[in-house]
Image (cartoon, coloured by chain):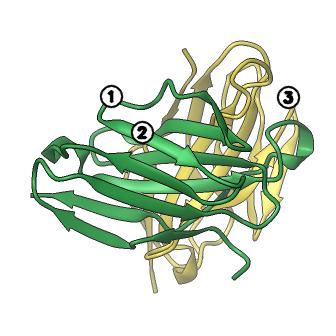
Chain colours: A green, B yellow
Amino acid sequence: GAGVSQSPSNKVTEKGKDVELRCDPISGHTALYWYRQSLGQGLEFLIYFQGNSAPDKSGLPSDRFSAERTGGSVSTLTIQRTQQEDSAVYLCASSPSTSGIYNEQFFGPGTRLTVL
Amino acid sequence: GDSVTQMEGPVTLSEEAFLTINCTYTATGYPSLFWYVQYPGEGLQLLLKATKADDKGSNKGFEATYRKETTSFHLEKGSVQVSDSAVYFCALRPLRGSNYKLTFGKGTLLTVNP
């Protein structure tokens, strides 16, 4: 497909379990972003990648959250020891670059995470 | 830090009504401003944008003008349709520094009834 894809679309897990969320960016996009959409906080920036490097991890809410990107393509967001407050929709976006007119961010459909 | 405030919803209108969704921002310098739309069951889509003061972004009958003096970017449409029912997000991106990071408002749910 031509757009950003995310999997799974829905994930239900028990408190304390680890989860992995996957993002496939648009082919050729060097920049990749993770955001979180929750009822209380709205849409929050989590982390972004330029290639495989993550220059800004400042939005990750705790050290239970980590992300990686391999081959300049797929990214995985991992949440360890999930808590109920982690329940949210996790959105991934990609852009051709981070600078200039080519940095429009294209969003995926999101992964809805529910922690019981 | 940067922030975006948009009118809280939900907003319910009849078809062909006039729409305004207010958005104001706080940021240093001259950020780029955006409206994103999220249709039911779909991801965020860029609706329109403006990158400098007095610019008007427009798309699908929607318009918004970048007003530096009032730090506002209100979304308007003259005649809404049922298909415009969605959640609308105002957002900014700084010109410098963290210029990759979008800061969003909390979103406004619009429902248009036939």
Q: Which residue is mark 1?
A: A63
Splitting the image into 4 quarters, where does residue A100 fall? Answer: top right
Left or right: B8 with respect to B30? Answer: left
Number of numbered discs on residues = 3
Q: Which residue is mark 3?
A: B53
Amino acid carrying mark 1 in the image: Asp
Local SS, label 3: loop
Vertically, is A11 above or below A44? below
Instruction: Name the residue located 39 percent from the left edge and 73 percent from the top edge.
Output: A9
Decide which of B38, B70 is in the foreground and name it: B38
How crowded pointer 3 is (Cα within 10 Å; few <14, some 14-19, many 20+) is rated as: some
Label at residue A66: 2
Select label 3 or label 1 by which is in front.
1
Instruction: Name the residue located 44 percent from the left edge and 76 percent from the top edge.
Output: B41
Please, which chain is the residue tagged with disc 2 on?
A
Vertically, is A19 above or below B5? below
Discs 1, 2 touching: Cβ within 8 Å: yes
In the rendered image, residue B37, in percent from the top left (x then y), is placed at 58, 61
